Amino acid sequence: MVLLSGTGGLFAQSFKGLRLGALVGLQGNRFGAGFGTQLSSTHRSFTQGAAASFLTGNFIIGGEFYQSSGTREQGPESIQLTGSNMSLVVGYCPFRTSSFRLETTLGLGISSNQIIAGRSDSKDFENLVNNQFSLNPGIAAYINNRSNLTWGIRLFYDIGVNGNTAWKYKVNDTDSIFQSNVNAFVIQFTMGGIIRFDKE
């Protein structure tokens, strides 16, 4: 195989494989509303999921699914965010060696989000949902060994293409007074392997 050297060269165009991996990470949102509380609009969540990508030459096409969950509390007030995200991801690998890949990616996804906000000393709370389409440009780096096990990190920004939309009351699907996008910075760590189809 012909590999790209550190100072330039040719890519190994014959490379083909299926990369599978488990995902864990962190997601950071900055909402435009406090959802009836005095809490900060910054919210952090834990994410977990799975991804699969078909690799051919320097091109990547695949998909991923992950769920997010996080709670922000201060005194009796709390905001609980849960969500699920599915994305179709395409990308390009501008640099790689036999054990390293640097990739640029762009995903088209859909997210389903729920917020429960209120006070522990009151029976009043908000139960809201918001579904959006999103774009998520990102960059990723992967290391693999001779057994084709892989470890990687991916950083991307999830952009809700609907903009600032009204969150809906879950009980009756009507618009609430709270408007905010679901934009988020996401960092993912992945571990998995590559099933190779080319001849080394």
Image (tube, grey):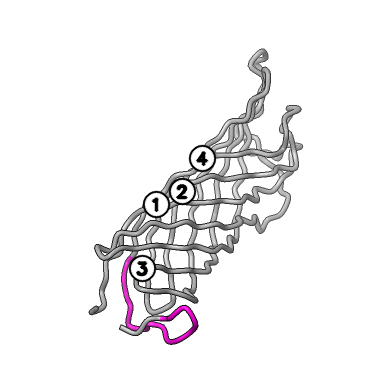
Say which quadrant the C terminus sits in: bottom left
Residue located 49% across and 43% down the image: 47
The mark lying in front, picked from 4 and 2, is 4
First in residue order: circle 4 vs circle 3: 4
Q: Circle 2: is it few (<14), some (14-19), or many (20+) Cα within 10 Å?
A: some
- Picture coordinates of residue 91, whole percent (x, y): 49, 71
* Identity, as a three-letter code, of the amino acid under mark 4: Phe
Label 2 secondary element: strand
The mark lying in front, picked from 4 and 3, is 3
First in residue order: circle 2 vs circle 3: 2
Residue under label 2, please give it. Answer: 66
Q: Bounds of the magenta span?
A: 4-18
Label 1 with label 2: CB-CB less than 8 Å:
yes
Q: Quadrant of residue 81?
A: top right
Q: Quadrant of residue 192?
A: bottom left
State the separation of the CA atoms marked 4 and 2.
Answer: 10 Å
State the separation of the CA atoms marked 2 and 3.
Answer: 26 Å
- Picture coordinates of residue 130, whole percent (x, y): 62, 44
* Identity, as a three-letter code, of the amino acid under mark 2: Tyr
Label 4 with label 2: CB-CB less than 8 Å:
no
Residue under label 3, please give it. Answer: 99
First in residue order: circle 3 vs circle 1: 1
Residue under label 1, please give it. Answer: 50
Q: Circle 1: is it few (<14), some (14-19), or many (20+) Cα within 10 Å?
A: some
State the separation of the CA atoms marked 3 and 1.
Answer: 22 Å
* Identity, as a three-letter code, of the amino acid under mark 1: Ala
* Identity, as a three-letter code, of the amino acid under mark 3: Ser
Residue under label 4, please give it. Answer: 46
First in residue order: circle 1 vs circle 2: 1
Magenta-span inclusion, residue 6: yes
